[in-house]
Image: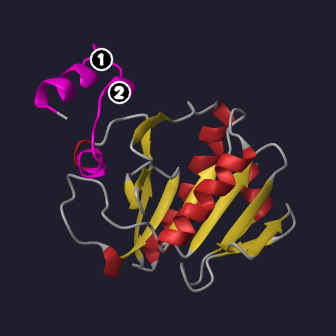
Amino acid sequence: MTQQELHEVAQGIRSPEQVSMTLAEFLKYDVDGYEYVKGELVPMSPPTRIHSKVSVKVIRYLDRHVEENQLGEVHVEATFQVGERGLKPDVAFMPTSQLDGDENTGFLIPPDLAIEVLSPTDVQWRVVDKAFAYLNAGTRFVWVLDPRSKTVTIYRSENDIVLLMREDTLTGEDVVPGFTCQVSQLFE
């Protein structure tokens, strides 16, 4: 990607879909509102009010726990290298041990915990594909929150998937030690 192309994308003159770039360039320039999948820029679904509300609840509970226990950092729509993809989970956790490198670019590794909040336009197979991409790249946990059904699906591996209902308790297990939250609290 040339500097001119980047400028045109930033100014809204050129659509990001019309620009050819590598994963390294995507991680460096971080094109807002897009993820990088299979060599292409893929637009992210615009967040709805409920999507935003649930994301804030997750951030509130998770960040408070992470901060109080000095476990690392919670990030919102930061770019992570996930195999050959550049993905932006709605919320992500990185332990202190993984926090190095240039803070002005995306992460060159996947998050330990990736959290996706479903939007009405999300397609189930794409969400599952994304969860498996995280896991295959080294993410230890993926939480998918569904505001419509008020459930959390936990992906630990392709063979270890658990659905939590409103009355269940979500825990950070050994990824975010000590974190617990009633599922219903995330959707109030």
Q: Is residue 13 magenta?
A: yes
The x and y percentages for residue 76 are 45, 51
Q: Main secondary structure of the magenta part?
A: helix
The magenta segment: 2-27
Q: Secondary structure at mark 1?
A: loop
Q: CA distance from mark 1 to mark 2?
A: 6 Å
The x and y percentages for residue 174 are 57, 86
Q: Relative to 175, is 162 on the left or the right?
A: right
Going by the numbered disc 1, the residue's amino acid type is: Arg
Between 90 and 185, the residue placed more toward the observer is 90
Q: Relative to 158, is 75 on the left or the right?
A: left
Label 2 crowd bin: few (<14), some (14–19), many (20+), radius 10 Å = many
Q: Is residue 93 magenta?
A: no
Going by the numbered disc 2, the residue's amino acid type is: Pro
Residue that sits furthest to the top in the current view: 13
Residue located at (20% from left, 29% from top): 6
The x and y percentages for residue 120 are 72, 34
Residues at discs 1 and 2 in contact (Cβ within 8 Å): yes
Between 140 and 186, the residue placed more toward the observer is 140
Quarter holding the N terminus is top left
Label 1 crowd bin: few (<14), some (14–19), many (20+), radius 10 Å = some
Above or below: residue 126 compared with residue 129 = above
Q: Quadrant of residue 35?
A: top left
Q: Which dot marks residue 145?
A: none
Between 69 and 117, the residue placed more toward the observer is 117
Residue tagged 2:
16
Q: Which dot marks residue 14?
A: 1
Q: Secondary structure at mark 2?
A: helix
